[in-house]
Every structure is written in C-alpha cells, then in structure tokens.
C-alpha cells in the first residue's frame, strides 16, 4: 500500500511539473475553449442582373468609355547645338560640319470618337506638330490617324482613322448644366490606361484664364491629369458635355481645378473643321478691355456695361466704320455685350462680309455704326488679342 501511495505522489508531482513547464513555454496548450456557435452574418440580397446599385454611375461609364480613345504622338526634334561646335580644336577632329542631331519625342493624350466612320475629337496641343499619330481604341485595336484640321484658338482638333462602325459618343447639352451637377472625366491619365474619375461642375463660363483665345470653360473638380487632355467630360447619363483641356496645378497633377471646353463650342468648331478643314471667324480689328469701375475711373468714362476700345487697326473693319479708341461697345445687332469675352465670341460667329450694327457710347452719346465684318486672320494665343 505504501508503494502504491508513493507511485501516486510521484505521478502527481510529475503532472504538476509538466503543467508548470507548459504554462511557461506553451501557454496556448492550456487554453481550453468550449465549442463556439457559428457566426451569423447578414448578406445583402443580390441586385437583379444588369441593375446598378444606388449612386452608381456604371451605366454612364459603360455607355461613354468605348468612344474614348488613347492617342500617342511622336515627332522628331532637332537636338540643341553642341556648345563646342564652333571651337577650332573640336572642329579639327569632327569636321567643319557636325551632323544634324535629331531625336524622336513622344507624348500622349486622349480623344473622343464623334462618328462611326472614324472622326475623333481631341485637343490641338495633343496633336500639334506631330509626325505620327496612333490611336488605341478601348477594345484593344490600334490604328494610325491623320489630322483633318485644327483650331489653336479653342485648342480643338479633329483627326481621323480608317476604321468603320466605331462606337461614337452621344452629345449632351452643356447649356443646361448647373453648378453642383455630377460629371465624369474619361481619359488616359499618365498613360496608365483608360480611367474614369468623378466630380461636380464647380463653375460655368470660366474665361480670362490665358489658356485659349476663346474661353468659356466648364470648371470641374473631377481629377484630370496629364494624358486626360482631349478626353470626354460626360454627364450621369454618359452624354458628352465637354472636352477636357487644361488643369490649374502647381505640381503638374490634379489639384481639383480642371477645365473642359463645352460641347456647344466643341460642336461648332468640329463641324467647321470637318467641312472646311479649318475655322472661319468674323473680325472687327480692335483691341478691347472689359469695362469696370476701375477702368471707367482711369479713363474718366461712365461706368456702364460694355467693352472699352483701346486700339483700332488701321484700315481694318472698325477703322473704316469710324470706331475710335475710347469708344465703349455696348452691343452689336441689338444684342447687349457686357464684356470683351462676349463681344469676342459674338463677332467671331459673324460671317465675314456681313453687315453689323455696332452700338458704341462716345462722349456719353450712344450711336450705331455700320461695320462690314472681315475674316479673322490667324492669331496668337492671347486673351487680349483684337477681335
């Protein structure tokens, strides 16, 4: 009996020692858990096939994305002249004439298919001076493109690919848009591939930005980055309301201020380019400045809505009609023109050769002067250029 008791005591001692060692080195062995009940989660009922969830813009993106393309351009540029090209010792070894050094540079942008037979809208600065243009469609196909025409003053261009039955964009109505409306920007940012970003219309009718001669931008906070230029700005139904053109940025990336050319101006320029290969605009031959209290005080003029004539081109249409510096243009053909941007746009839309009645205020007296509108000559991109 004493022997059995001794064996029991040794067993208990060993067991307690084992528990002590396990608690120090393998405590997880001593964690005994009761069986747990299965976790019950609530699963949202699946949406019917084809139906988008609430607040989704997948239908708009799906409608517009096939019509947005990536544009790759390249051109040869002459390398800078070598700094030792005129050094006698250098020329002794390399000859009197150094070979012309050229290099090919590439850039990228976006475009929007506007017709099934291959016409594509993009920005002028995307394809300007390009030797080669290649278009990559959303379905993976690529094709070379040629420039149909370009308009630097609105930064728009039309190119064409030799493909048929292409998916084309549906034009919306930018004139009915309001600040706060949701818009989507579609393009090829930084060359990563086609992407869609979302934002709202931040402002309408932005001008005097120094970007183009004719400015009437839609401002949006939808992220627009390098490579998005020429891409589509669409509404929540997937209809085109603008062509993405520029951003305001100190870093080169999106800072929430992007600008798109509204579809009304886009359509007007596009139709002329496709029909004539260029854009024809009316021209008055004056330099103008917006009237405001500061301008009125500086020139000792009445503070009225209109545009101050600060220069008249000799023998131009305005000069022949006796419009003089210091006149205030308040309207044309009975339409009030409150600022220079409105006057510039209205005159540009007049056909060369037509007669216009220009209402001017001179020495506090308003009079109407008949002017024969001329054809606008090529201009530099300057917001104070004469209309």
Image (cartoon, rainbow, N blue to C red):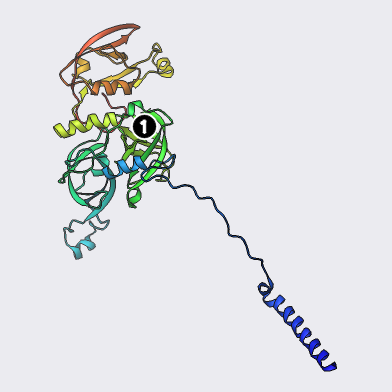
Labels in figure, total: 1
Q: Which quadrant of the view contains residue 266?
A: top left
Give the class, few, some or many, for how many residues have Cα within 10 Å of label 1's Cα (few <14, many ≥20). Answer: many
Tell me if I can see residue 213 in this picture.
no
Q: Point out residue 348 in the picture as x, y percentages from the top left corner.
A: 24, 24
Image quarter of the N terminus? bottom right
Please report the residue visible at 26 percent of the width from the left and 42 percent of the height from the top.
67
Tell me if I can see residue 141 in this picture.
yes
| Picture layout, residue 263 above or below residue 338 | below
Please report the residue visible at 14 percent of the width from the left and 32 percent of the height from the top.
276
| Picture layout, residue 104 above or below residue 231 | below
The residue labelled by disc 1 is: 218
User: As drawn, which residue projects farthest toward the bottom?
Assistant: 3
Would residue 350 be found to the left or right of residue 364 on screen?
left
| Picture layout, residue 33 above or below residue 237 | below
Q: Point out residue 386 in the picture as x, y percentages from the top left corner.
A: 27, 24
Please report the residue visible at 23 percent of the width from the left and 10 percent of the height from the top.
369
């Amino acid at each position: 009996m004493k022997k059995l008791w001794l064996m029991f005591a040794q067993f208990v001692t060993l067991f307690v020692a084992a528990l002590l060692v396990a608690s120090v080195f393998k405590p997880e062995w001593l964690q005994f858990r009761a069986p747990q009940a299965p976790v019950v989660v609530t699963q949202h009922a699946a949406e019917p096939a084809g139906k988008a969830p609430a607040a989704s813009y997948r239908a708009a993106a799906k409608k517009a994305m096939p019509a947005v393309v990536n544009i790759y351009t390249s051109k040869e540029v002459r390398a800078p002249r070598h700094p030792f090209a005129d050094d006698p010792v250098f020329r002794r070894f390399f000859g009197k004439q150094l070979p012309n050094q050229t290099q090919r540079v590439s850039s990228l942008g976006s475009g929007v298919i506007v017709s099934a037979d291959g016409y594509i809208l993009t920005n002028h600065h995307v394809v300007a001076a390009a030797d080669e243009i290649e278009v990559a469609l959303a379905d993976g196909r690529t094709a070379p493109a040629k420039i149909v025409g370009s308009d630097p003053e609105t930064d728009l261009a039309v190119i064409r690919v030799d493909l048929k039955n292409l998916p084309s964009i549906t034009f919306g109505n930018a004139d009915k848009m309001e600040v706060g409306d949701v818009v989507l920007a579609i393009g090829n940012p930084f060359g990563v591939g086609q992407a869609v970003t979302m934002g709202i219309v931040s402002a309408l009718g932005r001008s005097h930005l120094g970007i183009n001669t004719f400015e009437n931008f839609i401002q949006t906070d939808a992220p627009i980055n390098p490579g998005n230029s020429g891409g589509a700005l669409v509404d929540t139904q997937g209809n085109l309301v603008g062509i993405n053109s520029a951003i305001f940025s100190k870093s080169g990336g999106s800072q929430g201020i992007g600008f798109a050319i509204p579809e009304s101006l886009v359509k007007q320029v596009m139709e002329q380019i496709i029909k004539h290969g260029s854009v024809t605009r009316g021209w008055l031959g004056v330099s103008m400045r917006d009237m405001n209290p500061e301008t009125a005080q500086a020139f000792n003029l009445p503070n009225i809505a209109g545009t101050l004539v600060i220069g008249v081109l000799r023998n131009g249409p305005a000069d022949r009609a006796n419009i003089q510096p210091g006149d205030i243009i308040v309207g044309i053909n009975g339409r009030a023109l409150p600022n220079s941007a409105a006057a510039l746009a209205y005159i540009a839309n007049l056909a060369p050769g037509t007669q216009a009645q220009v209402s001017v205020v001179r020495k506090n007296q308003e009079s109407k002067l008949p002017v024969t509108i001329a054809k606008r000559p090529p201009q530099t991109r300057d917001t104070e250029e004469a209309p």
